[in-house]
Amino acid sequence: MITTVTLNAAIDQVYEMNSFVMGQTNRVMQKFQQGGGKGINVARVIKALDGDVLIGGFIGGLNGEKIKASLQEQRLPTSFIQIEGESRICLTVTDYQTKEMTELLEEGPTIQPHEWKKMLRWVEVQAESSEYLVLSGSLPKGLPPNAYATIIHLLKQKGVRVTLDTSGEALKQGIEAIPFAIKPNEDEISQLIGKPVEKQEDLIQAGEKLRDLGIEHVCFSLGEKGALFINSTGIYQVNAPKINVVNTVGSGDAFLAGLIYKLSQGASDEEAYRWAVACGSVNAGEKEIAKVQKESVESLLKELQITNVKVR
Ligand SMILES: Nc1ncnc2c1ncn2[C@@H]1O[C@H](COP(=O)(O)OP(=O)(O)OP(=O)(O)O)[C@@H](O)[C@H]1O
Ligand SMILES: O=P(O)(O)OC[C@@]1(O)O[C@H](CO)[C@@H](O)[C@@H]1O
């Protein structure tokens, strides 16, 4: 089974507008909301691909209840830890005219020490039934920057393959615990290498260093440019297809879902890498966050080539 953990779950609220102008009154044309946060999105896509998945994380307050109800409605299995604080709301505003998306992300609740201890015990129990575990998203207040690193250490001892998708210090410290896979986007890669990514060689150098630490799948997601993957056999590039972009929020989560779902099915690395890009791109063409159809992914896959940029 694949388990996903969302320490900072959210109600994802999407507002669609004819135009969105800062400092003015803006009217919402359409709106929709659902339980979200990165790990929950990953799980939603894995389920859509027919994978066996369990959603874990912290939820609290009325927003927490709404998140739970929305996931129940979507028939997604959950096992949350209830907290004293209130889960957050994350707002995406999409502008029909400029086709731009603006995200407003609340910081979220503060986790109490006893709640964190409960989470660590829960994670250890999940290790018994989870072959893969995905840790995604920002750390809520109250948790130390080595929170993900702590979980990775715990789970690695038990043979679980842990994927990490976060940013900043939590990513840096998580990497030191050597997860099975990571998926930084361009901003996160720049944070890691301490300078902007200017050319492919920068990515290759950074990727090889990370791979040499022992991370099995270093996956650099590059938005409309697709992705670069570094593993023990080489460096692989998958270009993203040209699509009509509607809402890219959650594309990184859909990407991870495709990757881990295929690896868990025993697919080759190259096959899993193509699925990752296909899932990310299908999501970018949809209004809603992390709602992809397996048939759309399979059809897009026919357009995706994988190139072995370098043999290692
Ligand atoms: N404009 C686009 N056109 C086609 N595919 C896209 C586009 N943007 C994203 N994708 C697909 O989604 C994948 C992940 O995108 P990206 O690198 O932007 O992730 P991310 O920044 O983690 O996303 P998010 O944080 O919004 O979930 C890409 O590798 C690609 O397959
Ligand atoms: O604050 P985080 O955890 O980094 O990101 C939260 C978030 O923007 O990520 C998802 C899209 O990837 C959304 O569901 C959610 O609102």
Image (cartoon, grey):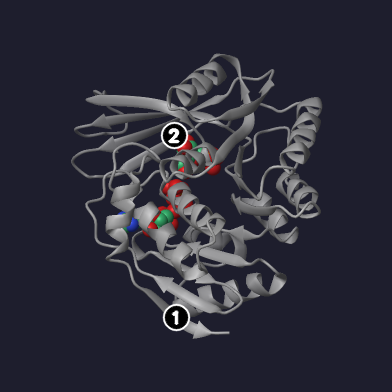
In the image, is residue 238 above or below residue 298?
Answer: below
Residue type marked 1? Asn
Q: Quadrant of the C terminus?
A: bottom right
Ligand number 1: quarter of image? bottom left
Q: Residue at x 30, y 25 (%)?
A: 31
In the image, is residue 290 above or below residue 260?
Answer: above
Foreground tag (1 vs 2)? 1
* Identity of the residue furthest to the bottom in this view: 311
Report how far apart the C-alphas of labels 1 and 2 lie in the structure: 38 Å
Q: Residue at x 24, y 45 (%)?
A: 99
Q: Is residue 40 visible?
A: yes
| Chain-order first, disc 1 or disc 2 | 2
Which residue matches tag 2? 104
Name the residue nearer the viewer: 76 or 283: 76
Residue type marked 2? Leu
Q: Secondary structure at mark 2?
A: strand
- Residue 6: quarter of image: top right
Residue 136, x across and y down, in percent: 58, 45
Residue 302, x across and y down, in percent: 28, 64
Q: How packed is label 1: few (under 14 Cα within 10 Å), some, or many (20 or more)?
A: some
How many discs appear?
Answer: 2
Q: How packed is label 2: few (under 14 Cα within 10 Å), some, or many (20 or more)?
A: few
Which residue matches tag 1? 308
Residue 13, x across and y down, in percent: 40, 28
In the image, is residue 36 above or below residue 157?
Answer: above
Q: Residue at x 61, y 60 (%)?
A: 181
In the image, is residue 142 above or below residue 275?
Answer: above
Q: Quadrant of the N terminus?
A: top right
Horizontally, is 216 left or right of 152 in the view?
left
